[in-house]
Image (spheres, rainbow, N blue to C red):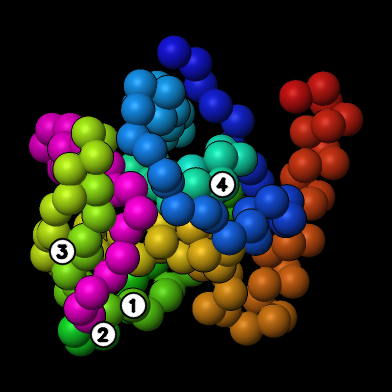
Amino acid sequence: MAIMTVLRYPDERLRTKATPVEHVDDALRAIIDEMFETMYASQGVGLAATQVDVHKRLFIADCGEEEREPLVFINPEIIAKDGLFANEEGCLSFPGVYASIERAGSITVKALDRNGEPFEMDATGLLSICIQHEIDHLNGKLFVDYLSPLKRDRIRKKLEKEARIAERMGQ
């Protein structure tokens, strides 16, 4: 397995709307395994396929606090939402950037697992936030889209500056 490259904002590929997964096979499971390796190496709790330049409706999550609880969501769809909850969010595509975002406090999602088997689950707290965040990625929406244009512009400029510095240093 290999660590995949995570696209960084303002890369326009992050705005690509993902297409449904047609077949769950060994090739897709290999991508899923590489996504988990990438997410864990980056100390993330979720990763959408679009963030690693695979534009399929697939994301992974692991919000386990004590031990790993890896979850796979293929062709996910939120079928119920309830309440509102504001929480500080970050994103692997926005290193070092955090912002308070308001999302549904609890959700019900349906999807396929890594074997192509359908399931439904209820989620609250961090897992609910993570699922909504990753589904946004699959729809070409980024968490900064919930912020004011001024805040978005400041974040873009900050990340562009950091990328230029890293490029000059050969990283």
Q: Secondary structure at mark 3?
A: strand
Q: Residue at x 62, y 83 (%)?
A: 148
Q: Which residue is mark 1?
A: 103
Q: Are marks 2 and 1 in contact (CB under 8 Å)?
A: yes
Q: Are marks 3 and 1 in contact (CB under 8 Å)?
A: no
Question: Image quadrant of residue 5?
Answer: top right
The span from disc 4 to disc 2 (Cα, nearest Å) is 29 Å
Taking the image as shown, residue 63 lies to the left or right of residue 151, namely left
Q: Secondary structure at mark 1?
A: strand
User: Mark 4 or 2, which is nearer the eye?
Assistant: 4
In the displayed structure, 20 sits above or below 110; it is above
- Report x, y in % for residue 165: 82, 38
- Report x, y in % for residue 14: 63, 54
Checking the image for residue 84, the label placed there is 2
Three-letter residue code for mark 2? Leu
Taking the image as shown, residue 76 lies to the left or right of residue 31, namely left
Question: Image quadrant of residue 107?
Answer: bottom left
The span from disc 4 to disc 3 (Cα, nearest Å) is 25 Å
Checking the image for residue 73, the label placed there is none
Which residues make up the magenta segment?
A: 63-81
